[in-house]
Amino acid sequence: QVQLVESGGGLVQAGGSLRLSCTASGSITRLNDMAWYRQGPGKQRELIATISSTGGTNYVDSVKGRFAISRDNAKKTVYLQMNSLKPEDTAVYFCNANVGILRRAEYWGQGTQVTVSS
């Protein structure tokens, strides 16, 4: 079994910054793509950033230029640096990891709340 634990959420004013972390532990043969999703109030969960095992990244348009995803493979940790935060960034943020070699599975963290006040 694999566990993902997020940290770093909180309350911040518009224009501020936060850094989220997500660390994987457990039976990890290989940590493949990792990602951050978010789910705002009354909204569906949306994919906002992905990072491959070799560091390739992709972002949804709404966060491009403001958010940066990175990872430390030795620490089995993925980060999300969030700058120039806006009230519409308010959501629960979830990390996601694809784990395995021949048999792959996806795992989710429990979520961390980010609230941006205007």
Image (spheres, rainbow, N blue to C red):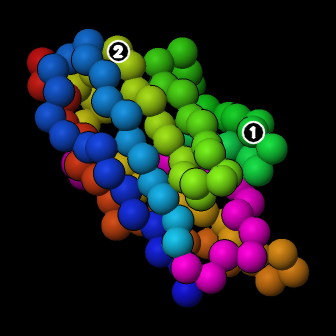
Q: Residue 34 in magenta?
A: yes
* 91 w.r.t. 17: above or below: below
Q: CA distance from mark 1 to mark 2?
A: 23 Å
Amino acid type shown at disc 2: Ser
Q: Earlier in the sequence, mark 1 or mark 2?
A: 1
- Looking at the image, the residue that sits furthest to the bottom is 1
Q: Is residue 106 magenta?
A: no
Q: Quadrant of the C terminus?
A: top left
User: Is 54 situated left or right of 20 in this image?
Assistant: right
Q: Position of residue 65 (x, y in %)?
A: 54, 15
Helix or strand or loop: what does disc 1 sit on?
Answer: loop
Amino acid beneath label 1: Gly
As drawn, the residue found furthest toward the front would be 74
Which residue is pictured at 50% across the width and 41% down the height?
A: 79
Q: How many marks?
A: 2
Determine the residue positioned at 55% across, 79% down: 26
**Closer to the camera in the image, 52 or 37:** 52
Residue 59 x/y as whole percent: 61, 32
Q: Residues within 10 Å of mark 2 (few under 14, many from 20)?
A: some
Q: Which residue is denoted by mark 2 in the rendering?
A: 84
Please report contact status of discs 1 and 2: CB closer than 8 Å, yes or no: no
Identify the magenta region: 26-42
**Secondary structure beneath label 2:** loop
Q: Which residue is mark 1?
A: 55
Q: Is residue 99 above or below residue 32?
A: below
